[in-house]
Image (tube, rainbow, N blue to C red):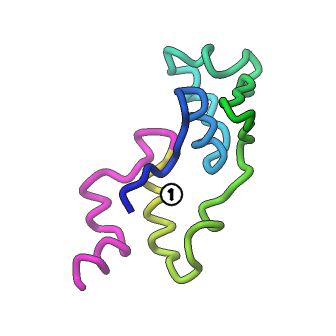
Amino acid sequence: NGLPLFVGENEGDQLSAIMQYKGLPPKSLMKRGTRTKKFFGDDGKPLNVTNSKGKVRNPNSKSFEMIIEDDEKEFLDFIKKCLEWIPEERLSPDDALQHPWMLQILNE
């Protein structure tokens, strides 16, 4: 539909929007981050980010299953694998082209 998947007013709100669906990033990823302290406390919990409308987003408060139809299980799997926190665990472009959902689309 041409709209962003995760909408945020700024970096903190954007990250909060992602964490609503993805939960907290793994500690191993946070340790690699150069700006982790800007968004997370020493305990690994997100710093409180309230947007201009007063909205606070909580990690794991939404799921992709809430917005993707039941008959789209392969698409859901594809999206989740594309959005892995750890870059090395994400689908590579070659692997994405071999994913069952993509093969179905390419063969239509």
The structure residue drawn at horizontal position 66% and vertical position 30%, both measured from the top left corner, is: 52
Q: Position of residue 41 (x, y in %)?
A: 72, 18
Vertical position of residue 105 compared to residue 92: above or below: below
Label 1's element? Answer: helix
Left-right relation of 14 to 24: left
The structure residue drawn at horizontal position 22% and vertical position 83%, both measured from the top left corner, is: 107
Q: What's drawn in magenta, residue-wise? A: 85-108
Q: Position of residue 8 (x, y in %)?
A: 55, 37
Residue 69 image-quadrant placement: bottom right
Residue furthest front as drawn: 53
Name the image quarter holding the C terminus. Answer: bottom left
Q: Position of residue 67 (x, y in %)?
A: 59, 66
Residue in front for this viewpoint, 49 or 52: 52
The structure residue drawn at horizontal position 77% and vertical position 21%, both measured from the top left corner, is: 43
Q: Position of residue 54 (x, y in %)?
A: 74, 33
Name the image quarter holding the N terminus. Answer: bottom left
Vertical position of residue 53 compared to residue 5: above or below: above
Amino acid at circle 1: Lys
Vertical position of residue 24 compared to residue 33: above or below: below
The structure residue drawn at horizontal position 67% and vertical position 21%, both measured from the top left corner, is: 40
What's the magenta bit mostly, secondary-structure-wise? helix
Vertical position of residue 35 compared to residue 10: above or below: above
Q: Would you call the spot at circle 1 few (<14 residues within 10 Å), some (14-19), or many (20 or more)?
A: some
Left-right relation of 84 to 91: right
Left-right relation of 71 to 26: left
Residue 102 in the magenta stretch? The answer is yes
Residue in front for this viewpoint, 88 or 9: 9
Residue for badge 1:
80
